[in-house]
Image (cartoon, rainbow, N blue to C red):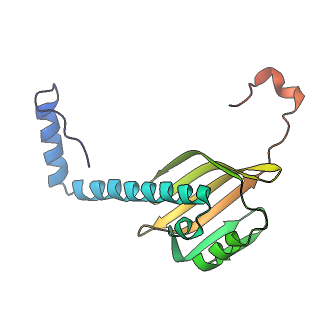
């Protein structure tokens, strides 16, 4: 919900007038609904990534619509359906040994998560793009990349990333 500015502040009267005009124009309800959708999807993502890091397959896949599609562009694969996605992840021969969400960015129905996932002997950098509809992920695209050595030729222009 939006916080109302204090009536005693320098903008109190102007803020109330603006908000009243905004509501009369029919804009307030869709705007507040968009905030609620974003909050709901953000909370679902936090629960999803928390379950993923704990290896809780059932909780991890609650976020997906039954007919969700997940694309892996680098391998040319498409997984159709939540049950197939959960089965695929449940049968991975090398269970993750570490999981670190670096950041989550998004708004409304489109969210991007950047994270690293560690398997025995290697760590991959991952970007996940999730599209929501009615509170569930209907499409996800994941990009995976293994770390690589920085070339020496560009060392004068860069600093090591944290």
**Residue 81 in view (yes/no):** no
The image quarter containing residue 37 is bottom left
Splitting the image into 4 quarters, where does residue 108 fall?
Answer: bottom left
In the displayed structure, 81 sits above or below 20; it is: below
Residue under the point 73% across and 61% down: 95
- Tell me residue 58's x, y (percent): 55, 71
- Left or right of residue 5, residue 32 in this image: right
Which is more toward the observer, 155 or 93?
93
Camera-side residue of 146 and 9: 146
Query: Which quarter of the figure has residue 43?
Result: bottom left
Spot occupied by residue 96 in the image (x, y as percentages of width and height): 71, 57
Residue at x-position 12% and y-position 40%: 17
* Residue 35 shown left or right of residue 82 in the figure: left
Left or right, residue 32 beside residue 87: left
Which residue is situated farthest in the top direction here?
Answer: 156
**Percent from the top left, x then y, of residue 55?**
62, 62
Relative placement, left or right, of 54 versus 40 is right
Question: Where does residue 131 sit, x and y in percent of width and height?
Answer: 52, 63
Question: Exactly how many numbered labels are in the figure?
Answer: 0
Tell me the quadrant of the picture where the C terminus can be found.
top right
Residue 159 seen in the figure: yes
Q: Residue at x 88, y 27 (%)?
A: 153
* Residue beneath the point at 39% across and 59% down: 40
- Judge whether 95 appears above or below 68 on screen: above
């Amino acid at each position: 919900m939006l916080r109302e500015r204090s009536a005693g502040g320098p903008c109190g009267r102007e803020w109330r007038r603006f908000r009243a005009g905004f509501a009369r124009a029919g804009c307030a309800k869709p705007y507040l609904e968009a905030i609620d959708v974003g909050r709901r999807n953000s909370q679902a993502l936090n629960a999803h990534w928390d379950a993923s890091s704990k290896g809780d397959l059932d909780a991890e896949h609650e976020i997906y619509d039954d007919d969700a599609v997940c694309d892996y562009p680098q391998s040319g694969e498409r997984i159709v359906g939540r049950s197939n996605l959960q089965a695929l992840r449940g049968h991975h021969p090398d269970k993750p040994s570490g999981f670190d969400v670096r950041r989550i960015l998004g708004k409304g129905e489109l969210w991007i998560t950047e994270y690293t996932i560690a398997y025995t002997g290697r760590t991959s950098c991952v970007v996940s793009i999730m599209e929501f509809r009615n509170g569930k992920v209907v499409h996800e695209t994941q990009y995976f990349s293994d770390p690589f050595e920085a070339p020496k030729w560009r060392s004068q222009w860069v600093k090591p990333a944290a």
